[in-house]
Amino acid sequence: MPPKPAEAKIIIMKTVGGEVGAASALAPKVGPLGLSPKKIGEDICKATGEFKGIKCTVKLTVINRVATVELVPSSSALVLKALGEPPRDRKKDKANEVVAVHDGDLTLDAVIDIARTMRPRSLARTLAGGVKEILGTCFSIGCTVNGAHPSEITRQINDEELVIPDE
């Protein structure tokens, strides 16, 4: 039974950017709402085009059987996009069992821009705290910042050797 008129249903799901997901995976989520899984998959593909090959979170808002797709970027997706690596072909990588290595270098300005983008979703009180969160993501991904290890940059921020602007 479809939902009542003007009732908003929100579906949050992870998907690979720029790829049409399997309709069989979307059907249990959007089928009961009276939507076509194939059409929703194409809409998600269009919305996530700039994050091609990167896993990202998508928020579907369904009102009166009309779905709007909104991209909710995670910090790791933003860091991988800032690294500018070529999109990986998951099917070929799966066959060769290749482990993705992200050994690029980001500038501190790029990290600050990512922290500003993530500011509404961050739990940090200041922008410096948000930058430290993004530096932790850089550490887990394996990239460097300004040619140095991210934990070294975090130490410099803690020791006030490196000043992060307020907002």
Image: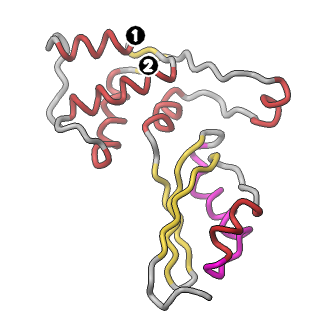
Left or right: where 35 falls relative to 136: right
Q: Position of residue 59 (x, y in %)?
A: 50, 60
Q: So how many labels did they put on this image? A: 2
Give the farthest residue toward the bottom.
5
Q: Amino acid under label 2?
A: Phe
Q: Does residue 111 lie above or below 51 as drawn?
A: above
Tag on residue 149? 1
Left or right: where 63 falls relative to 88: left
Q: Which SS does the magenta portion mostly show?
A: helix
Amino acid type, callout 1: His
Residue 130 spot, x, y in % from top left: 27, 33
Which image quadrant for residue 147? top left
The crowding category of the residue bearing disc 2, from other C-alpha atoms within 10 Å (few below 14, some 14 to 19, many at least 20), is some
Question: Cα distance, mark 2 to mark 1?
Answer: 7 Å
Which quarter of the figure has residue 41? Answer: bottom right
- On the image, the x and y values in percent for residue 142 come to 51, 17
Residue 75, x across and y down, in percent? 43, 37
| Residue drawn 29% across the image and 42% down it | 122
**35 is within the stretch colored magenta:** yes
Which numbered disc, 2 or 1, marks the residue that appears first in the sequence?
2
What quarter of the picture does the C terminus occupy?
A: top left
Look at the numbered disc 1 and give the secondary structure of its residue: loop
Segment tinted magenta in the rendering:
32-51
Query: Which residue lies under the disc numbered 2?
Result: 139
- Return the residue found at the far right: 95
The kind of secondary structure element at disc 2 is: helix
For the point 17% across and 29% down, which residue is it? 165
**Vertical arrangement, residue 153 with respect to residue 68, above or below:** above
**Which residue is drawn at the image coordinates 75% and 36% (left, top)?**
90
**Quadrant of the rendering where the N terminus is positioned:** bottom right
